[in-house]
Each structure stands twice: as C-alpha cells, then as structure tokens.
Image (cartoon, grey):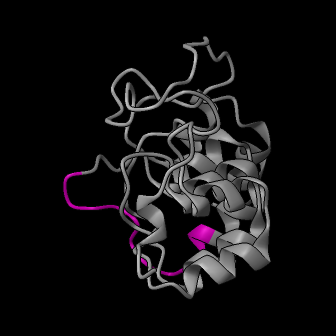
Amino acid sequence: QNENLLYVHNEEGYNLLQKVVGINNVEMVRWCLTRNVDINRGVCSLPLHIACLRGYEDCVEVLLKHGARIDVEARMCWPGPHNQNCEQRGKYCVPDVAMGDRSSDKLQNAIYYAIDGDQVDILELLTQQGEDHWLPWQQKRPLLHIACERGAWNCVKYLVLER
C-alpha cells in the first residue's frame, strides 16, 4: 500500500508501467498514471521512449498529456536484458543473451527513439508539440541527417517533404 509502483520490478528488472506500455495496453497505462508516478525518471527504457520506438501513438499521447517530457534522455534496454552500462544490470536473474535488434546504449530522447523505430506518425506528433526538444548541452543535429544515418527511410521521406 502507498508503494510507488515504479520501484517494484519484475524478474527482468522492469516496472509495471514499462511492461504495459510495451504491450500497448492504454487502459493500464492510464491506471498507472493515476498513481502519482514520475514518468520522467528511471534508469532506462522510459515509458515514452518505449512507446515512441514501437509506434504506439495512443500511449504516446496519454504519456505526453500526463507530463512525459520529450527532451529527457535515457538508454533503451527494453525488452531484453539490461545493457552493459545500465544500473539495473546484475540486479536481476536473466540469462545474458545477445540481442541483435537492440536500440543503442546511448542516452537519447524520445525523438531519437521514434526515428530508431522509423515511426513517422510518432515523429510528426513529437515535432508538432511546438517546443524546443533539446536541452542546452545536447548537440542539435538536423533530424533528416539522423534519420539517414539510422536508415529510417519512412522518417527520411517525411522529413524531406515537411522541411
């Protein structure tokens, strides 16, 4: 009772909000968000980042409505074992399996994860939020260049037409 549900992890080291975003269960996401959780804090795999990478537009909209910040950076471990540099690694008993389709171990914001997943609708939604999504210390690079580097061809087509 009165325990922050983001501090309770399963055997893989993920909390309930990460899991329900990962399966695109929007109603459970809404329920979790009624529990006064800070959705912008976490060691890795922030809920907004998972939703952006997978293209779960309804989840992205709900998370943004509840204060998820586009500019917050974190690494992506979900859905597999935690990355080598993640604080959660070693705390949970999961076999160390090489993941070929993993996102980067780099700290990234939501826009980068939308590009990594080649999720045009999510990229459009995030860029239309009308704010500067870069913190002062973040390198500002054209999104078109990032999409080209990462092979996100649908995002490339969108950015060429929009910009």
Magenta-drawn segment: 126-137
Relative image position of residue 19 (x, y in whole percent): 66, 54
Residue 21, located in which quarter of the rendered image?
bottom right
- Could you tell whether 132 is left or right of 76 in the image? left
**Horizontal and vertical percent position of residue 153:** 77, 37
* Nearer to the camera, 12 or 48: 12
- Residue beneath the point at 27% across and 50% down: 138
Would you say residue 29 sits in the magenta stretch? Answer: no
Residue 59's place in the image compared with 56, above or below, is: below
Query: Quadrant of the rendered structure where residue 37 is?
Result: bottom left
- The residue most toward the front is 1
> Who is closer to the viewer here, 103 or 156?
103
Q: Is residue 163 left or right of residue 44?
A: right
Q: Give me the residue at 41% from left, 82% from top.
A: 2
Q: Is residue 132 magenta?
A: yes
The picture places residue 55, in percent across and down from the top left corner, at 76, 55
Q: Is residue 48 left or right of residue 60?
A: left
Residue lying at 71% horizontally and 53% vertically, measured from the top left: 22
Q: Nearer the viewer, residue 74 or 94?
A: 94
> Magenta stretch mostly in which secondary structure?
loop
- In the image, what residue occupies the spot 73% across and 43% down? 118
- In the displayed structure, would residue 12 be above or below residue 63? above
Residue 152 sits above or below residue 133 on the image: above
Q: Give the image location of residue 58, x and y in percent.
A: 77, 74
Q: On the rendered image, what quadrant is the C terminus found in?
A: bottom right
Q: How many marks?
A: 0
